[in-house]
Image: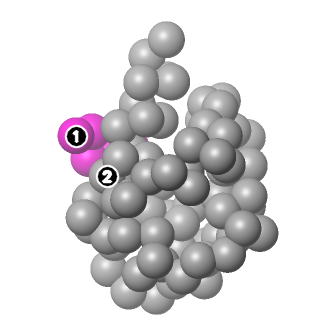
């Protein structure tokens, strides 16, 4: 897993979710705090900052933050 990308996405998630705790690849979206508006803020930031499109629907099917990092990595590589 790309550590730099992970840290960047963790920062986006902390901002979007107002989350103060540590985020690991195993952190679940339930732990971050569910909320579709928060998820939309996160996916919008990813699209704006990294030019990687991940849909809200995709994120809703993911269990862990690590899955999101892997998905964004795939988008960036394309």
Q: Residues within 10 Å of mark 2 (few under 14, many from 20)?
A: many
> What is the secondary structure assignment of the residue under circle 2?
helix
- Identify which residue, 5 or 54, lies in the foreground: 54
Observer able to see residue 37: yes
Quarter-wise, where is residue 70 in the image?
A: top left
Q: Residue at x 50, y 51 (%)?
A: 61
Return the residue at label 1. 1
Task: Answer whether residue 8 is visible to the viewer in this image.
Answer: no
33 w.r.t. 12: above or below: below
As drawn, the label of residue 52 is none
* Residue 42 counted in the magenta span: no
Q: Residues within 10 Å of mark 1 (few under 14, many from 20)?
A: few
Residues at marks 1 and 2, CA–CA distance in whole angstroms? 8 Å
What secondary structure do most residues of the magenta stretch adopt? helix
Q: Residue 29 location, x and y as percent? A: 46, 69
Outermost residue, front direction?
A: 61
Viewer-closest of 52 and 28: 28
Q: Position of residue 40 (x, y in %)?
A: 74, 58
Horizontal arrangement in the rendering, residue 40 relative to residue 2 (left or right): right
Q: Which residues are magenta?
A: 1-5
Residues at badges 1 and 2 in contact (C-beta under 8 Å)? yes
**Residue at the disc numbered 2:** 66
Residue 71 in the image, given as x and y percentages of width and height: 43, 35
Residue 74, percent from left and from top: 42, 24
Q: Is residue 9 left or right of residue 16?
A: left
Residue 72 sits above or below residue 4 on the image: above
Mark 1: which secondary structure? loop
- N-terminal of the pair, mark 1 or mark 2, is 1
Q: Is residue 61 left or right of residue 50?
A: left
Is 59 drawn above or below residue 35 in the view shown? above
């Amino acid at each position: 897993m790309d550590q730099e990308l992970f840290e960047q996405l963790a920062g986006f998630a902390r901002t979007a979710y107002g989350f103060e705790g540590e985020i690991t690849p195993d952190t679940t979206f339930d732990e971050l705090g569910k909320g579709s508006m928060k998820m939309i803020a996160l996916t919008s930031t990813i699209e704006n900052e990294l030019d990687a499109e991940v849909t809200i629907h995709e994120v809703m099917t993911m269990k862990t933050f690590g899955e999101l990092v892997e998905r964004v990595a795939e988008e960036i590589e394309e």
